[in-house]
Image (tube, rainbow, N blue to C red):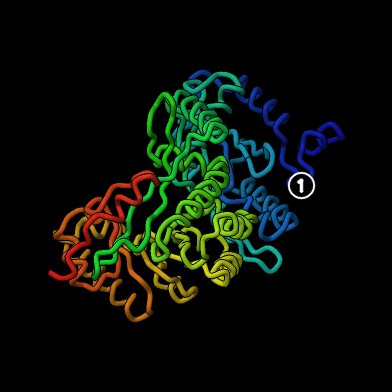
Amino acid sequence: MAGGAGQDLAHGALTSLPNRVLFHEQLEQGLRQTRSGDQLAVLCLDLDHFKDINDSLGHPVGDALLKEVGRRLEATVGEQDTVARLGGDEFAVVQTGRSEEIAARSLAGRLVEVISAPYQIDDHQIVIGVSIGISLSPQDGSNPDELLKNADLALYRAKADGRGTYRFFETGMDARAQARRLLEMDLRAALQRDEFQVYYQPIREVASGRVVAFEALLRWNHPQRGLIAPISFIPLAEETGLIVHLGEFVLRSACTDAATWPDDVDVAVNLSPVQFKSPNLIASVTEALAASGLGARRLELEITESVLLQNSEATLTTLHELRAMGVRISLDDFGTGYSSLSYLRSFPFDKIKIDRSFVSELATREDSMAIIRAVTGLGRSLGIVTTAEGVENDAQLELLRREGCTQAQGYLFSKPRPASDVAMMLERPRLRASA
């Protein structure tokens, strides 16, 4: 498609690929040319975590990465296919021919593989992923707008299913997307209306039975739908960036509440990976401590392994800054990721929390018992506190006590309850100190 100024305007200056306007025209043309019985596929692509690259390595590296992605796309699609850059890190492909579902599935699989291969840009080796949504004509739409909208809905599903994959449009996705949009609007309004509340779940010392801390957990009190569980809104809050505001609310509330508790009772606050990337994190923690008067040593911040996967150097710098303030750092969901042991070498964590999935099967699976034994032994050797999550019965507690687990948390002691119930939870009788 070499040509004059008109075509230059229709192509992006960065990648030289057709832009959204030209892509729309070519999609229309493809639909007109498609013979009866033929199919046409639209693939919408979105680079996974591209913003992280831009933020950490700068826009010149991001631009060079987009150019290389464009080159890989053009080299992978068929001769009759059209590749376009719709804007930012969004790309699209029109694929024409017979049996397009099979061809589209094959192409999407190749694109995920090709785009996920490492890139060497300047002195940086960069690894990104791609999520792809696919719509087919005529069944998913007979005009460009409908096909693009449905491919976009399928793209959203691919992202929701864990990214780095592809999904075809299915009937009902539009209804789910509308429900999601309503939930997002509700979520934004809820922040303005103060519908969120922090609940607390006690963490007990296994040896003495006393409450040593409370974990702060967010609840949404919706005026029509009642109490909404975090699993229903936290992923959306992370995707929209609202988790940063919610996280700051939890941090402020937890520090303010904990300042009224006895001095030997701490508070644990979860940090979302999105929140951890916020440049305001250190300032937010500092302000929450200063405003509440809570001593930094009584605040424990819980992070998951996914935080450490983001950008190890910047992440470790932030963790060391928090530690220097006196705040304690806990590694949550320990044992569920790929590199937990290596992380214990990279940063001196104060606590490791054993994931509930191991605790729930303690009495029935020998491998769960072996993992608990290994983690508690590791904690003793490294001088790290171990906390078992999801303890629901005395048998589990007894096994954890026998293995030397330091702390325990779960429904055996209490469900998460509002701040007004903390005094009552502190007064509950201690656990037996020995078997």
Relative to 370, is 426 on the left or the right?
right
Is residue 42 in sight in this rendering? no
Relative to 409, is 239 on the left or the right?
right
* Spot occupied by residue 332 in the image (x, y as percentages of width and height): 40, 60
Instruction: Identify which residue, 354 or 413, lies in the foreground.
Output: 413
* Spot occupied by residue 199 in the image (x, y as percentages of width and height): 39, 46
Quarter of the image that includes the N terminus: top right
Q: Residue 282 sits in which quadrant? A: bottom right
The residue indicated by pointer 1 is 14
- Residue pushed farthest right? 5
Q: Residue 57 sits in which quadrant? A: bottom right
Q: Tag 1: residue type?
A: Leu
* Spot occupied by residue 265 in the image (x, y as percentages of width and height): 39, 62
Q: Residue 233 sits in which quadrant? A: top left
Residue at 27 percent of width and 50 percent of height? 414
Relative to 238, is 55 on the left or the right?
right
Question: Dot 1: few (<14), some (14–19), or many (≥20) neighbours within 10 Å?
Answer: few
Instruction: Identify which residue, 392 or 333, lies in the foreground.
Output: 392
Quarter of the image that includes the C terminus: bottom left
